[in-house]
Amino acid sequence: MINGTYYFDRFYVDGIVTIGWNTFDSKRNIFYTIPGISGGTTTVNQTANGDTDGANYSLGIGGGYEFRSGGFTFLPYARLNYFKLNINEFGESIDNTSDGFGLTLEFRDQTVESLTSALGGQAINAISTQVAVVVPQLLFE
């Protein structure tokens, strides 16, 4: 992760870049009972296992301006975030040949993308007392 903020007097710009690697393990229980062809029943009780990996990337940029008057500060801002997750293809496996062993699934590559934006502000009021400085804040988007 790389992040930073740059200030131009009361105006600021901040950004963040992240890269991550993920591992995914899955376990799917397969359990059912069906009537047999010549009477009786067949019960399937299997566990299909899978594992894969993937990567995620994100980029965010934002900026705002600080208005001050006495102990009151107002910070309007805007932000844009992009996120992408890739999960590699994988197939499940069952480690025996009991009934239901052929019910494994295969999964294609998966990609999730997200682009979000926000407009908001923060209002801060520093109130000085004899004991401490109280700083109530209001954040809205």
Image: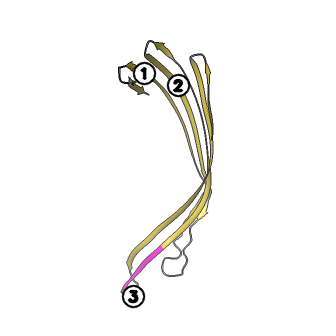
Residue holding disc 2: 78
Q: Which mark is residue 26?
A: none
Quadrant (top left/top right/bottom left/bottom right) for the C terminus: top left
Spatial distance from mark 1 to mark 3, Cα to Cα? 76 Å
Local packing at callout 1 (Cα closer than 10 Å; few below 14, some 14-19, many 20+) is some
Task: Tell me, yes or no, whether the two marked residues, 2 and 3, touch with CB atoms within 8 Å.
Answer: no
Q: Is residue 99 above or below residue 109?
A: below
First reached walking from the N terminus: tag 1 or tag 2: 2
Camera-near label (1 vs 2) is 1
* Residue type, numbered disc 3: Ser
Secondary element type, mark 2: strand
Secondary element type, mark 1: strand
Query: Magenta residues?
Result: 39-46
* Residue type, numbered disc 1: Ala
Spatial distance from mark 1 to mark 2, Cα to Cα? 15 Å
Residue holding disc 1: 123
First reached walking from the N terminus: tag 1 or tag 3: 3
Residue 134 place in picture, x, y as percent: 38, 24
Quadrant (top left/top right/bottom left/bottom right) for the N terminus: top right
Pick whichever, 28 or 41, lies toward us. 28
Magenta: predominant secondary structure element? Answer: strand
Q: Is residue 96 above or below residue 127?
A: below
Residue 11 is covered by the magenta coloring: no
